[in-house]
Image (tube, coloured by chain):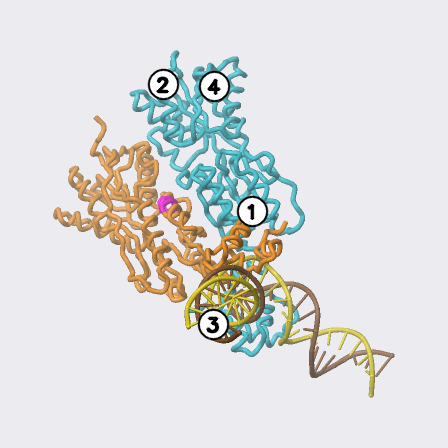
Chain colours: A orange, B cyan, C brown, D yellow
DNA sequence: ATACTATCCTTTACCGTTAAAGTCAAGGCA
DNA sequence: TGCCTTGACTTTAACGGTAAAGGATAGTAT
């Protein structure tokens, strides 16, 4: 029932606990003979160091907290898939938290992570400035922080791994314009920085071609499929009719397509749709979704590397870095570019 | 830079550390006056207990390890989404590990979790009996274990939350038979229990209608989209031609559809496809996928509840439970039942 | 022979918290 | 008055490990 401890090893060998510890930590002042004996006993008993006890003395848990807004959204899972191998090979564990887009839950998760003394946190913040104080406190306490995806909490000095959201909006919108669409509506995201920036990119791209978007062309909602669905229902009532939609993310775009189909219209013939995110399976949808994507694995990988390299060089506080993962247009069929024969 | 400790609180108040500890643990032998003073100081300094130190003394980390084979497979993520809220409200953290279907990685992840003294483990085991010894050892050490999805390691006595895989196979196959298909091939999974059981269900359903499946009707591979794709390529060469495929899971079914389309054939007109799993977005595929599904959130929820209830009643070793999540057929379009007008 | 120096261990203290046992003054009871 | 409770703390030891400082023994320089 009880885990083997160094005490036991030391006892059976007639050496001190410290000697065992030194062998396991590769200290130089241990004779080859003792080292061998200890290692043999370790092997025999299948001993493994107790990470909790080590964390307490070393003041390092080798654990990263991950706080994301939605586990069911494949975007964040892909980011985690990018973080995992980097953390894993370096011996870091991942403590997974979901905020469910709720700032209060986010706060309590962050507090939980603080209490558990995680070495670092990867955060995709729920849209609310309420937790800025906690984040500031965490960094002050020596917890490294990397924000991914969301560019909120401007006063918090930490690494950020983002994409260029204005460019995202421009890419999507220009493409639709290039295909001859003119009445290009926008399904906006929630009230967070990068949703606003995608909107700005959309607006700028239209303006660049001399099109002024009327107010009815934009409906702001959330990032969920249901939000896109509701928003599209509204956009379908706009007159004169719109002929394209740029949705702030793929789930919203998918929701929009559902609404379009329900109205008996066709994608892309009646309304072209472009999303953002390139979520998994988007190429296998009834109408494969044209989208603006970037590598989430890269995003996760960068986040983990920033975090871990900052942890290894203890002491020196690295300058906050902004890594921009370049977005690119992924043309499929929902935009009407028709890449079938 | 330094976290506030009980020592500091005790010092500033002129009481012993134990007194502070007792207040925070709601011990009775503390006067109302002292309790109030301590609580006020805790509030003032924003003090929070150090979970690492508590874990060491309490021999409880309030952490569950989760080991899944593939982070990119939405199935497991959905299970996690079912586990998360249950664990979260009870104050348990989730340490996430991905084995990448590799038994060696799985082993090292399990060892990592053992070293970190997790209270329990939710495991979807990679297909290999190699780690049975470790699992037995873990349970012997007092770590609760719940296996989800995979029904391997029969000698390990632990709770299991599974679905009825034979029924899954029967449900899918009978449905195709009901629709008039007769040459129903099977894309099998890897060499693990529930893949074999789905195969058995398929075989039994055919036999029940007097059909004996020839050997070429089954191709066994893995659970990934690529496996389904390759398997289908092979099945397309079978003569006389097959008119339906039951794939052991949805990614494989999607891979199969890709292969079918690439061969210039249509789903379901030329070949009907039924998968297993009801992954997210399956209803939005180019041809919405008919599949046999069950609630993964329920599965995760059950797993977490079994684990946590076992942890609360410390000492008494609960009888291993088998929870069967009932599968149900989800009819869409890939089977040819035609639920459009 | 004496002091010096490696080499190889051990002792002691500490990480932050909790449980068990101990202290001590005030109050109750015979 | 003396003894026993009771209430409200404090002291001590422990959880499992690591770091720093402290021996002991043997070999080397002088």
- At mark 1, the secondary structure is loop
Marks 2/1: CA–CA distance: 51 Å
As helix, strand or loop, the secondary structure at mark 2 comes to loop
Q: What is the crowding at mark 4: few (fewer than 14 residues within 10 Å), some, or many (at least 20)?
A: few
Q: Secondary structure at mark 4?
A: helix
- State the residue position of label 3: B45
Q: Residue furthest top?
A: B240
Q: Which residue carries the number 4 mark?
A: B178
Q: Which disc is residue B236 wearing?
A: 2
Residue plotted at (33% across, 27% down): B258
Q: Earlier in the sequence, mark 4 or mark 2?
A: 4
Residue B267 % position (x, y) = 35, 23
Magenta span: chief secondary structure: helix
Q: Find residue B326 and report its image quarter.
A: top right
Discs 2/1, front: 1
Q: Which residue matches tag 1? A: A46
For the question of whether residue B334 can be seen, the reply is yes
The quadrant the C terminus of chain B occupies is top left
Image side of residue B7 versus residue A193, left or right = right
Residue at 53% of width from left, 55% of height from top? B91
Q: Which residues are magenta?
A: A75-82
Instruction: Tell me the SS state at disc 3.
Output: helix
Q: Residues within 10 Å of mark 1 (few under 14, many from 20)?
A: few
Label of residue B175 in the image: none
Of badges 1 and 4, the one in the foreground is: 1
Determine if residue B181 is in view.
Answer: no
């Amino acid at each position: 029932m009880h885990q083997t401890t160094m005490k036991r090893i030391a006892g059976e060998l007639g050496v001190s606990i410290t000697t065992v510890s030194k062998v396991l930590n590769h200290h130089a002042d241990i004779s080859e003979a003792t080292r061998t004996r200890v290692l043999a006993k370790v092997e025999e008993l299948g001993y493994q160091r107790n990470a909790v006890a080590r964390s307490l003395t070393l003041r390092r848990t080798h654990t990263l907290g991950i706080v994301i807004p939605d586990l069911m959204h494949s975007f964040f899972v892909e980011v985690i898939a990018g973080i995992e191998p980097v953390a894993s090979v370096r011996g870091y564990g991942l403590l997974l938290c979901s905020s469910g887009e709720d700032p209060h839950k986010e706060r309590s998760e962050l507090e939980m992570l603080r209490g558990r003394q995680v070495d670092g946190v990867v955060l995709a913040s729920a849209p609310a400035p309420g937790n800025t104080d906690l984040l500031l406190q965490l960094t002050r306490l020596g917890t490294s922080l990397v924000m991914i995806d969301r560019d909120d909490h401007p006063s918090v000095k930490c690494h950020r791994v983002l994409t260029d959201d204005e460019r995202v909006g421009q890419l999507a919108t220009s493409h639709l314009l290039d295909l001859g669409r003119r009445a290009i509506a926008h399904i906006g995201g929630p009230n967070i920085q990068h949703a606003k920036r995608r909107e700005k990119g959309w607006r700028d791209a239209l303006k660049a071609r001399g099109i002024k978007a009327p107010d009815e062309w934009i409906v702001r909602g959330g990032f969920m499929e249901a939000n896109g669905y509701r928003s599209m229902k509204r956009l379908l009532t706009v007159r004169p009719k719109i002929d394209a939609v740029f949705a702030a993310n793929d789930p919203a775009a998918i929701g929009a397509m559902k609404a379009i189909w329900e109205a008996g219209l066709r994608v892309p013939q009646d309304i072209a749709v472009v999303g953002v995110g390139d979520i998994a399976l988007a190429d296998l949808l009834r109408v494969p979704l044209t989208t603006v994507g970037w590598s989430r694995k890269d995003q996760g990988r960068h986040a983990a590397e920033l975090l871990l390299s900052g942890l290894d060089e203890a002491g020196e506080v690295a300058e906050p870095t902004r890594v921009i993962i370049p977005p690119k247009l992924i043309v499929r069929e929902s935009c009407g570019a028709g890449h079938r024969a």
